Image (spheres, helix red, strand yellow):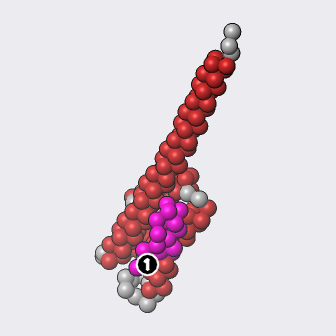
Amino acid sequence: MDWMPLLSTLAGAAIGIAATLIADRNRWRREEVRHAWEIRREAYTVYVSALKAAGEEIRAVALGDHLTASSRDAAVREAVRGSGVYTASEALWLVGPTRVVAAGNEAFHGLRALRDAYARGVPVGSPEEAPLVARRRAAMARMRQAMREDLGIGPLGIE
């Protein structure tokens, strides 16, 4: 009996199966990378949006009239709590790389410094508020830049 055709068929089948397995594994890896990218993009979007909303809310509170310092303090703190920034921050800490988390944390601390100033009664547009706003804006820009780099998106060049 001639074994050559049988061996050739078996070798061809083995090569075909191996090639299919390798292609499936590569496709799975690409899908996993894409899925992780989508999760990070969503977490980044939610976090940036929550920081932005919290900033707008505390500014609105600071512009409002509050009869007592304690009511102003409570309103500013509630504005931050209600923005969802704490939950969004946890998601960022779970899925973001160190550089993005550090930049996000810096932006969060900038927001907290502004929150605390408004809670103390620092008026919007005052000389005392200006460096806090500048700090927050710079931190937000650095955070967005780190997020864009992590996602493979080029710099905007407008911040």
Question: Can you give x and y, in whole percent of width and height, for residue 130 in the image?
Answer: 44, 86
Q: Residue furthest front?
A: 2
Whether residue 158 appears in this view of the structure is yes
Front residue of 49/25: it is 25
Label 1: state its secondary structure.
loop
Q: Is residue 112 above or below residue 133?
A: above
Question: Can you give x and y, in whole percent of width and height, for residue 33 in the image?
Answer: 53, 49
- Crowding at mark 1 (Cα within 10 Å: few <14, some 14-19, many 20+): few
Q: Is residue 49 above or below residue 118?
A: above
Front residue of 64/134: it is 134
Q: Is residue 124 above or below residue 50?
A: below
Pointer 1 residue: 157
Q: Amino acid at mark 1?
A: Gly
Question: Can you give x and y, in whole percent of width and height, for residue 80 in the image?
Answer: 42, 64
Q: Residue at x 60, y 21 (%)?
A: 9
Question: Can you give x and y, in whole percent of width and height, for residue 56 in the image?
Answer: 35, 70
Q: Is residue 147 left or right of residue 14?
A: left
Q: Residue furthest bottom?
A: 127
User: In the picture, residue 69 is in which quadrant?
Assistant: bottom left
Residue 122 magenta-highlighted:
no
Front residue of 29/139: it is 29
Whether residue 147 appears in this view of the structure is no
Specify the quadrant that holds the N terminus. Answer: top right
User: In the picture, residue 79 is in which quadrant?
Assistant: bottom left
Stretch of the chain drawn in magenta: 139-159
Q: Residue at x 64, y 17 (%)?
A: 6
Q: Residue furthest top?
A: 1
Q: Residue at x 49, y 53 (%)?
A: 37
Specify the quadrant that holds the C terminus. Answer: bottom left
User: In the picture, residue 64 is in which quadrant?
Assistant: bottom left
